[in-house]
Image (cartoon, helix red, strand yellow):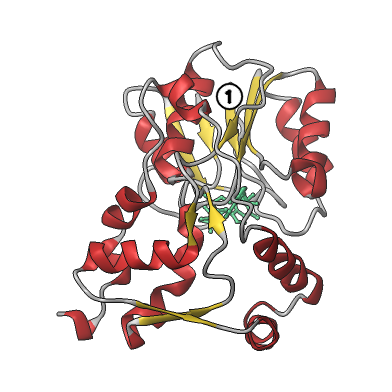
Amino acid sequence: MILVTGATGNVGRHVLAGLAGHDARGLSRRAGPGLLVGDLRGDLPLDGVDTVFLVWPGPDATGIERAVDRITARVRRVVYLSALAADQGFWGTVEKAVESSGVEWTFLRPGGFATNTLGWAEMIRRDGEVRWPYGAAARSLIHERDIAEVAVRALTTDDLLGRRPELTGPAAVTQAEQVHQIGEAIGRDVRWVELPSGLARRQLLREWGDESFVDGALTYWASLVGQPEPVTGTVEQITGHPARTFREWAGDHADDFRGPSSD
Ligand SMILES: NC(=O)c1ccc[n+]([C@@H]2O[C@H](COP(=O)([O-])OP(=O)(O)OC[C@H]3O[C@@H](n4cnc5c(N)ncnc54)[C@H](OP(=O)(O)O)[C@@H]3O)[C@@H](O)[C@H]2O)c1
């Protein structure tokens, strides 16, 4: 049996759907149709499980070794949803623990998810605008369905064993253009309002709390002005089709950005 952790999340829900026809179950901390109940920081239902799609919730690394030990003692293969920035965060800790256990592994290393822009949804629904810094920062955000397709390949074939595929969208799109494309998807003119970085810092500190995370994000976005994020062709090499565009993602998520005022 394949156990899909993070099965109620952005990527895991599509992994579970992509495993239709296989013996697969999702994991959640809450009961739901087709889901087993368990907690990566507590008890896990591993009876009969052969392969795990692993999503470590983060950002806290506490409990990684214990969870990975318990999983790898029971299963043959782990496909882990890591990150392009694996060397700078808890993702690297998970990769090391899985690799040293001796099980079969694949570490998927996506860049930023297009779903991160759902953080703008309330502003778009309510005000028809996005107030954010660094509109010229260009990002190669990836559609969660592309990550899930690669994951299904890694779970159900031997093609990606021992590999760390680096996954991005098909092009770098500026944040201001992303907002424009969301507007097109919902049939509404959505404005980009450039926030000076000092004001953005205060806003993000209120929303996100963690000072080093906020400062890290602002420094990173600033670096992407004039130096877009890299694009890899790995999704296409593995799936046989080009990675989905941000425009396509915005179309798939149009309902998330539609509000009463666009009805
Ligand atoms: N966003 C990005 O740009 C980006 C880029 C690279 C990598 N990543 C990584 O991708 C992962 C997130 O993937 P996602 O966006 O698909 O997930 P998500 O939408 O954030 O959902 C989180 C999932 O984790 C589950 N979960 C949370 N705590 C849990 C626990 N203690 N035990 C078991 N399950 C737990 C939740 O399930 P229940 O609530 O149902 O229990 C839910 O299904 C993170 O590791 C993140 O670092 C993100």
- Residue at point 72%, 45% (across, down): 85
Residue 204 position (above or below residue 226)? below
Residue 32 position (above or below residue 137)? above
Q: Where is residue 22? Give x, y as percent.
A: 38, 22
Residue 106 position (above or below residue 42)? above
Residue 99: tell me if it is visible: yes
Q: Where is residue 255? Give x, y as percent.
A: 26, 65
Q: Residue furthest top?
A: 158
Q: What residue is pinned by disc 1? A: 51
Q: Nearer the viewer, residue 249 or 189?
A: 189
Q: Is residue 26 left or right of residue 39?
A: left
How many numbered callouts?
Answer: 1
Instruction: Kindly state the secondary structure of the residue where label 1 is placed.
Output: strand
Q: Which part of the image, by quadrant, shows the C terminus?
A: bottom left
**Which amino acid type is shown beneath numbered disc 1?**
Thr
Residue 35: tell me if it is visible: no
| Mark 1: few/some/many CA within 10 Å (<14, 14-19, 20+) | many
Q: Where is residue 106? Give x, y as percent.
A: 64, 24
- Residue at point 54%, 12% (across, down): 159
Q: Is residue 76 left or right of residue 252?
A: right
- Asked whether mark 1 lies closer than 8 Å to ligand 1, one says no
Query: Which of the 4 quarters of the picture holds residue 71?
Result: top right
Query: Which of the 4 quarters of the picture holds residue 17?
Result: top left
Q: Residue furthest front?
A: 226
Q: Nearer the viewer, residue 115 or 12?
A: 115
Q: Where is residue 91? Give x, y as percent.
A: 74, 44
Residue 15 position (above or below residue 56)? above
- Residue at point 72%, 80% (across, down): 209
Q: Is residue 248 left or right of residue 71?
A: left
